[in-house]
């Protein structure tokens, strides 16, 4: 399906030479556009031509399934060689490619060539056949680079759209898994696939996804981030309202929960919508290991998130305004460390945080061989040198280092990046107003979170707004055992809200007798 389909399409002529010239002119006589003229035993009295773009097609498929049958096979019925019936006969009896379409419009044929198809033109017929022979070079399926797990599938998405869809279908093997491919971008005509589980997902969410994709009008889509910014509910917010993942099992789990996946050709990152704030603290690995261990790790993530956001501001507020809250010995130790420091605690914290952010970005942009070494050595050397030079205190170095480590605990990078930005606002509020500034900042953040929506779903669901059947512990802070998880997330209006028919214990726990 093409969301930017043109209303008026130019048709082919009956002259093969004229059609070939039109193709060459359309592509600017590009050297990678191959047009081969030949004679076919299927219609010896007519000249034919095959046109394709080198590097975007599977040459073996063209040779064995298109060119060889056209040159060697004969039509069994003489009447099929006449007039417009010839194209239908070639499509049904000669060309052995799995998908072959027919069109009379030049724009459709040009777009098919740009998508990696081979078109077959016949002299005297104002129409062409489009054979699906797309191929070319693309990266093989490998280990996920951005989301690693210890227990669970290790493979991740690649840049090839069809491969990514097949990875999801290899997990969810049901005809209820529906895939609709759209083309977005006036110049790139990028393939964007909408994937959902029919019979489970809310039809209203699927329609809303289609509507927002149809409203995108841009010259090109190069990555899924383009689509994310166009379809998200709230533009001016630091918090991500659409989840992204490189892992097929994570996307499959989201589809089973009644969510919609959006996969863009050319990128290994898929989008998942709708989502909630608590989804960014859940990892696919939580559901592959014991529920008690997963619950403990999930609670650690929430604690680390709070520390990454509030620890520097708390240190600034206590050392600047609320020294009486510290034990006497700790207060004396901190005062001794800050003796001779020329900057107030706020400037000291901002200086250290900005230094660490520079080191973090430098480690990411440097070559992978030396990047981690440079970032680690840089942090150690600069931190130790700054303390010895009397620019910052040792306590501030400890606070900033632990804050940075805590930000890496979160499984989703975009939520961790949000924490890095909000941290500076909290530090400024603490430096000016102490605990009162931190309290007001947290209150403003909670009000903002409560106002956000993701495709109509409250961002803080199921905590706010709560319902009779929505407990705050249900798969938010505690990962329940699989045998007790009966319902899918209740923040979605699903057609089929049940995962399994009953919530009783498994048979092994219902019988206390010894095995016979």
Image: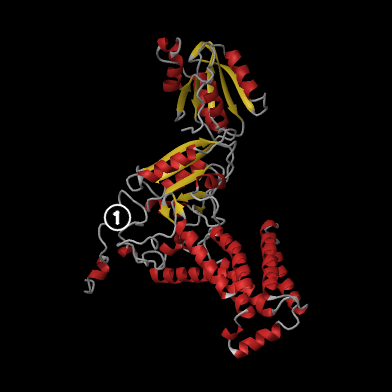
| Mark 1: few/some/many CA within 10 Å (<14, 14-19, 20+) | some
Can see residue 511?
yes
Q: In the rendered image of this protein, does residue 250 appear above or below residue 28?
A: below
Q: In the rendered image of this protein, does residue 460 appear above or below residue 113?
A: below
| 317 left or right of 378 in image | left
The color scheme shown is secondary structure
| 474 left or right of 41 in image | left
The front one of 115 and 436 is: 436
* Quadrant where the C terminus is found in the figure: bottom left
The front one of 63 and 226 is: 226
All told, the count of numbered labels is: 1
- In percent of width and height, residue 361 lies at 67, 60
Q: Quadrant of residue 393?
A: bottom right
Q: In the rendered image of this protein, does residue 154 appear above or below residue 478?
A: above
Considering the numbered disc 1 on the image, is that residue within a helix, a strand or a loop? loop
The front one of 477 and 152 is: 477
Can see residue 307?
no
Q: Quadrant of residue 204?
A: top left
- In percent of width and height, residue 203 lies at 36, 43
| 499 left or right of 276 in image | left
Q: Residue furthest bottom?
A: 329
| 88 left or right of 320 in image | left
Q: What residue is disc 1 on?
A: 498
- In percent of width and height, residue 479 lies at 39, 66
- In percent of width and height, residue 330 lies at 62, 87
């Amino acid at each position: 399906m093409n969301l930017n389909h043109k209303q008026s399409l130019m048709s082919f002529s009956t002259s093969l030479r004229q059609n070939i010239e039109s193709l060459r002119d359309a592509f600017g006589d590009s050297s990678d556009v191959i047009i081969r003229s030949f004679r076919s035993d299927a219609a010896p009295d007519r000249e034919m031509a095959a046109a394709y773009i080198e590097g975007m097609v599977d040459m073996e498929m063209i040779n064995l399934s298109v060119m060889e049958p056209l040159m060697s096979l004969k039509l069994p019925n003489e009447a099929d060689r006449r007039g417009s019936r010839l194209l239908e006969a070639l499509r049904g009896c000669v060309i052995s490619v799995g998908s072959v379409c027919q069109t009379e419009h030049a724009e459709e044929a040009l777009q098919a060539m740009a998508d990696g198809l081979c078109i077959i033109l016949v002299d005297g017929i104002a129409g062409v056949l489009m054979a699906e022979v797309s191929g070319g070079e693309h990266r093989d399926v490998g280990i996920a680079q951005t989301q690693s797990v210890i227990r669970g599938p290790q493979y991740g998405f690649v840049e090839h759209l069809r491969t990514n869809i097949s990875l999801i279908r290899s997990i969810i093997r049901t005809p209820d898994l529906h895939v609709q491919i759209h083309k977005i971008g006036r110049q790139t005509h990028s393939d964007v696939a909408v994937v959902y589980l029919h019979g489970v997902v809310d039809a209203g969410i699927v329609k809303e996804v289609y509507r927002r994709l149809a409203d995108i009008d841009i010259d090109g889509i190069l990555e899924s981030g383009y689509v994310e910014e166009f379809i998200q509910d709230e533009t001016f917010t630091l918090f991500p309202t659409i989840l992204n993942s490189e892992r097929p099992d994570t996307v499959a789990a989201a589809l089973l929960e009644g969510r919609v996946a959006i996969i863009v050709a050319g990128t290994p990152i898929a989008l998942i919508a709708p989502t909630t704030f608590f989804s960014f603290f859940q990892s696919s690995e939580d559901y592959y290991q014991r529920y008690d261990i997963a619950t403990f790790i999930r609670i650690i993530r929430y604690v680390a998130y709070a520390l990454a956001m509030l620890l520097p501001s708390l240190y600034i507020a206590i050392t600047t305004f609320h020294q009486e809250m510290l034990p006497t010995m700790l207060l004396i130790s901190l005062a001794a460390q800050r003796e001779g420091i020329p900057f107030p605690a706020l400037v000291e914290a901002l200086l250290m945080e900005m230094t660490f952010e520079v080191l973090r970005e430098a480690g990411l942009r440097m070559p992978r061989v030396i990047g981690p070494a440079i970032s680690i050595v840089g942090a150690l050397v600069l931190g130790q040198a700054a303390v010895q030079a009397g620019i910052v205190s040792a306590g501030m170095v400890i606070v900033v280092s632990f804050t940075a480590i805590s930000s890496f605990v979160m499984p989703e990078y975009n939520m961790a990046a949000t924490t890095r930005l909000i941290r500076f606002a909290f530090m400024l509020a603490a430096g000016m107003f102490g605990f009162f500034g931190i309290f007001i900042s947290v209150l403003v953040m909670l009000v903002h979170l409560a106002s956000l929506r993701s495709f109509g779903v409250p961002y803080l669901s199921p905590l706010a707004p709560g319902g009779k059947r929505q407990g705050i512990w249900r798969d938010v802070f505690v990962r329940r055992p699989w045998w007790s998880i009966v319902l899918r997330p209740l923040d979605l209006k699903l057609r089929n809200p049940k995962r399994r028919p009953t919530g009783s214990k498994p048979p092994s726990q219902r019988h206390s007798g010894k095995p016979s």
